[in-house]
């Protein structure tokens, strides 16, 4: 089984982190539309997302992106711009709601999870802090 995405007419050799055609069809309508004035958008948003996902999946530095993806400065600029606008959270929420609707679940999740190990650690820290303060107070009162 290939780890490469299913792309009908690839413009270049695909990376495992690239969007498949079905994934792109889900995300495409959720991306911002051109404003209709100013400079026309000349970048391929699918390739921008492929560049962002490449960096996120491989953990490489932006400057070390492969040369067959868009320039790293362009990819990083869109990443930051979309992050400041809250687009990543919006994409996450809309895709999650769509999936939950397809699974016949309420589109807004109502589950909360508490990590019991964190709770135990917090309790221990509080008890040790209290005992340390009590020892210091005892030492000060003895003087």
Image: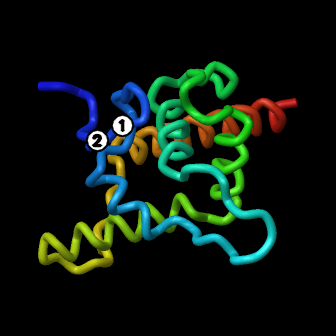
Asked if residue 85 is positioned above or below residue 77 in the image, the reply reads below
Q: Residue 100's spot in the image, x, y percent?
A: 22, 71
- Residue furthest to the right in view is 143
Left or right: where does residue 102 sit relative to residue 109? left
Q: For mark 2, does the 10 Å Cα neighbourhood hold few (<14), some (14 to 19), or many (20 or more) residues?
A: some
Residue displayed at 39% across by 70% down: 94
CB under 8 Å between callouts 2 and 1? Answer: yes
Residue displayed at 32% across by 77% down: 108
Mark 1 lies on a secondary structure that is loop
Mark 2 lies on a secondary structure that is loop
Which quarter of the figure has residue 27? Answer: bottom left
Q: Nearer the viewer, residue 91 or 8?
A: 8
Q: Which residue is mark 1?
A: 10
Q: Nearer the viewer, residue 110 or 18?
A: 18
Residue displayed at 44% across by 30% down: 57
Q: Which residue is mark 2?
A: 7
Instruction: Give the quadrant of the C terminus.
Output: top right
Label at residue 134? none
């Amino acid at each position: 089984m290939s780890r490469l995405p299913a792309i009908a007419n690839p413009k270049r050799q695909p990376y495992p982190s690239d969007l498949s055609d079905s994934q792109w069809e889900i995300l495409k309508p959720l991306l911002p539309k051109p404003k209709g004035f100013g400079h026309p958008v000349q970048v391929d948003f699918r390739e921008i997302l492929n560049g962002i996902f490449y960096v996120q999946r491989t953990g490489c530095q932006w400057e070390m992106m492969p040369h067959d993806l868009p320039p790293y400065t362009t990819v990083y600029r869109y990443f930051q711009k979309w992050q400041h606008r809250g687009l990543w959270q919006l994409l996450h929420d809309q895709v999650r709601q769509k999936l939950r609707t397809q699974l016949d679940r309420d589109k807004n999740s109502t589950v909360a999870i508490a990590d019991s190990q964190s709770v135990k650690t917090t309790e221990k820290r509080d008890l040790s802090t209290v005992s340390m303060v009590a020892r210091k107070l005892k030492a000060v009162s003895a003087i």
